[in-house]
Image (spheres, rainbow, N blue to C red):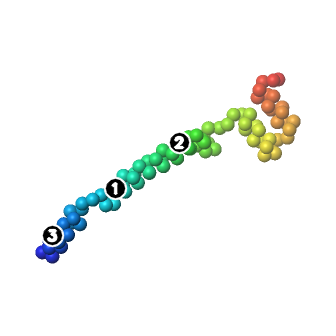
Amino acid sequence: MITTLTTAAAHPVAWSGAGPGWWIVFPILWFLLVAAVVFLVARRARRGWGPWGRAGSPEAVLGERYARGEIDESEYRHRREVLRGDR
C-alpha cells in the first residue's frame, strides 16, 4: 500500500486522470453509431423493406414479367390495356 501511494505521489498527473484520454473517443463513437442507424433506416425506407414490403404498380410488375420472358408481347399488350381500362 505504501508503494502505491509513493508511486501516486511521484506521478500526480497520471494518478489523477487529468486530460480527456480515451474518453473523448466514446461520444464520437456513439454519434457515429446513431448516425449509421439513421442512415440505414432512411435508406431502407427509401428503397422499400424487401419483397414483402411496398410493391410496385401493377404496370411495373407486368413490365418486369415481360422483361423476364414470362409472358410474350401480345399477352403483355393485352394485360396492359386491361390495366389501363382501354377495353
Closer to the camera in the image, 54 or 35 = 35
Position of 74 with respect to 85 (left or right) is right
Assess disc 2: are there few (<14), some (14-19) or many (≥20) residues with their C-alpha within 10 Å of its C-alpha.
few
Quick one: SS at disc 3? helix
Q: Which mark is residue 24?
A: 1
Q: Residue at x 41, y 54 (%)?
A: 29
Q: Residue furthest bottom?
A: 3
The residue beneath circle 3 is 9
**CA gap, disc 2 and disc 1:** 28 Å
Q: Which is more foreground, mark 3 or mark 2?
A: 3
Q: Is residue 26 above or below residue 15?
A: above
Q: Position of residue 7 (x, y in %)?
A: 18, 73
Q: Quadrant of the C terminus?
A: top right
The residue beneath circle 2 is 42
Please state which amino acid type lies under the numbered disc 2. Answer: Ala
Position of 7 with respect to 74 (left or right) is left
